[in-house]
Amino acid sequence: MGFAEFLGNEHIVAALRGALRSGRVPHALLFTGSRGVGKFTLARMFAQAANCERMTDDFCGECATCQRISLLAHPQRLIEQGLVERGESADAATVERVPLILQSHPDVWGLVPDPVRLKSPVARPMLRIGQLRAVQRAAYFQPMGKRRVFILDGAETMRWDVANVFLKILEEPPGSATLILTAPSPYALLPTIVSRCLQFHFVPLPQTAVERILKEKTERKPAEIKLAAQLAEGSAGLAIEMDVTAAAQSRKNALRILERAAQGQGFAQLFADTSALAKDRQSSIEDQIGVFYGLLTDLLELTCKLKEPVLRNANLAKELEALSKSIDSAWVVHAIAGFDELYAGARRNLNRQLGLDALAASLAQAPSGGLERHF
């Protein structure tokens, strides 16, 4: 048990262990990196190590405190429990008065974006002001154990007014507490928050490491393990959760949209494809955009004619190579810029259907540098 179970990003683990060993524990940490690379997991392990009853060089994972904190390893169960306790028909006032807090130990809190949508069906889950005010009240209490730890997962979902509440805590940090934020990038947060945190960036795991984790934690066939590790792009958490068949199909669907836009097979079918994608509520628009980014990265390598391109979507190598012959790198760069705008719009609750249609039309009208169009 202990930090040895955490694979990858060894330098971050070593830095955290060194801080705990020396007693110079930062009051605020920022973990950045793509989804599923272990940010929340390592934050939870840090909380265990900071409060372990038998702590030596590593936390034991077996004492009562470690066991209670380990329940955060399955946050979805705690989320569902919290939503049931608050009530399914909670209004806005109740949502703020009864904030969603994941707590399996008095000194360790997990905060995740509240999934309640209130009156808007397109509203995004976000960290709410009620959650941050609860942290603000509790952060200065003396811990029952050794140290209070507050984990704010998805910190990029805070609105600016909510972020300012959190900033007040950072400006007067409690001496016996550590606040850990997770986000995909520091640029998704207020600079004043980032500057007050010790930042660690998590890099994706090698494919071989992801495959090893899948062999240990799943009962998938070798071919499925290899494909899941490829599609997860270094994210062990994403690989474990992945429906391999659905993930592979989503990439084929996204590639078909790029093919139609680049080769000019008619707006009617192109919009039919984007409409089907917009209606897929099993995946968020951010995840869908991530699929396109992966395909476009491969296409950029191919159109730039690298000697040994390393394709993220190796299972679609033939299709990608064929498409790369009908477009040029300028078209790919234009597409990437378009998806950047779509991603920014998604953070402002842009209508998914309209955003995808507008982007598809823009790509279909852009010069591809390859085949002639026939609209």
Image (cartoon, rainbow, N blue to C red):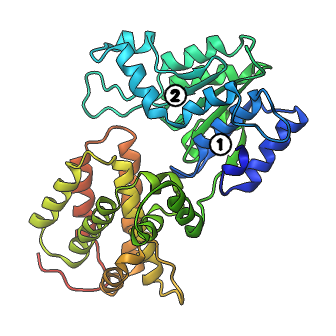
Q: Residue shown at 72%/13% (left/top)?
A: 140
Q: Nearer the viewer, mark 2 or mark 1?
A: 1
Task: Classify residue 102 as left or right of residue 151.
Answer: left
Q: Residue 346: which quarter of the image?
A: top left
Does 77 sit left or right of 156 as displayed?
left
> Where the C terminus falls, by quadrant?
bottom left
Badge 1: residue crowd in 10 Å (few <14, some 14–19, many ≥20) = some
Q: Residue drawn 60% across and 61% down?
A: 205
| Camera-nearest residue between 349 and 155 | 155
Image quarter hosting the N terminus:
top right
Work out whether residue 257 can be spotted.
yes
Check disc 1 and give the amino acid type.
Answer: Leu
Q: Is residue 333 among the parts visible in the rendering?
A: no
Residue closest to the eye, 30 or 52: 52
Tell me whether circle 2 and circle 1 mark residues in contact (CB < 8 Å). no
Mark 1 falls on what kind of element? helix
**Whole-percent x, y for residue 149 in the image:** 68, 26
Q: Earlier in the sequence, mark 2 or mark 1?
A: 1
Of the numbered discs in the image, which one, if any, rests on residue 42?
Answer: 1
The correct choice, above or below, for 85 with respect to 27 in the image is above
Please, what secondary structure does the residue beneath circle 2 have? helix
Q: Nearer the viewer, residue 164 or 37?
A: 37
- The residue singled out by tag 2 in the image is 160
Q: Residue, x 85% and y 41% (percent of image)?
A: 57
Indicate the amino acid at tag 2.
Answer: Trp
Label 2 to label 1: alpha-carbon separation: 26 Å
For image coordinates 59% across by 35% down, the residue present is 190
**What is the quadrant of residue 82 in the picture?**
top left
